[in-house]
Amino acid sequence: MRIDIITLLPELLESPFSASILKRAIDNKIVDVVFHQLRDYSEDKHRRVDDTQFGGGAGMVMTVQPISKVIDHLKSQRTYGEIIYMSPDGTRFNQSIANTLSTCENIMILCGHYKGIDHRIRDEYITKEISIGDFVLSGGELPAAMVCDAIIRLLPGAMGDETSALTDSFQDDLLAPPVYTRPAEWRGHKVPEVLLSGHAKKIDDWRHDQAIKRTQDLRPDLLGLED
């Protein structure tokens, strides 16, 4: 997989991709992540990428010219499964979307700033708009990194145990069950006996029951139980 990220602040993205699973996936050539500094595509002598908005109002808007130039350049080199714009008014990101995106060969992500991008870019190029929640950040870089993390960890070979991702929260619209490790007793708190039994069927049943219970208690909306 290749992920191209268009950004004004590539340095803000360097850290998340330089450690842990993401770094290993890049080092092992499971994924290629490339940052593109939007200012490099500006035809303004001062490398400006924003201007005041038509109709007046506070806040600047990212202009068409540099964004269209970088997207056209990238599209001339490969075909993209999705061209994503990180936007607070996009579709709320979830595990199902991450699963689908992980099957793409190439993804492009545009990180917005200021009051956003000229809407004509959204009409012309963007195939999917993604939000990570009902709040506004100073830019799309951190949300883009979160989306990439969720996608990359699903790629074959990215995780030490590829079956681990299959039991994550939200994979089956349930929260994950409680997990425990050694010691079996700590400060009077004991690990549930069923987990020590070695009985695979009973353990699976317990985990499923606990997943349902936790989801009912903490995220009833996932089960359609929210008022």
Image (cartoon, helix red, strand yellow):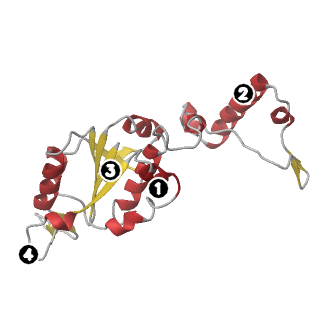
Earlier sequence position, callout 1 versus callout 3: 1
Tell me what residue is drawn at x 44 percent, y 53 percent: 27
**Up/down of 64 relative to 216, above or below:** below
Query: Label 4 is placed on what type of residue?
Result: Lys
**In the picture provided, is 163 more to the left or to the right than 68?**
right
Disc 2 secondary structure class? helix
Q: Looking at the rendering, which quadrant does residue 62 occupy?
A: bottom left
**Up/down of 62 relative to 103, above or below:** below
Disc 3 secondary structure class? strand
Earlier sequence position, callout 1 versus callout 2: 1
Disc 4 secondary structure class? loop
Earlier sequence position, callout 1 versus callout 4: 1
Q: Please state the horizontal and vertical placement of residue 49, each as a whole percent of the image.
A: 16, 67
Query: Label 3 is placed on what type of residue?
Result: Asp
Marks 4 and 2 sit apart, C-alpha to C-alpha, by: 63 Å
Residue 205 in view here: yes
Earlier sequence position, callout 3 versus callout 4: 4
**Up/down of 87 relative to 55, above or below:** above
Residue where numbered disc 2 is placed = 204
**In the picture provided, is 108 more to the left or to the right than 55?**
right
Disc 1 secondary structure class? helix
**Quick one: which residue is furthest to the right in this view?**
188
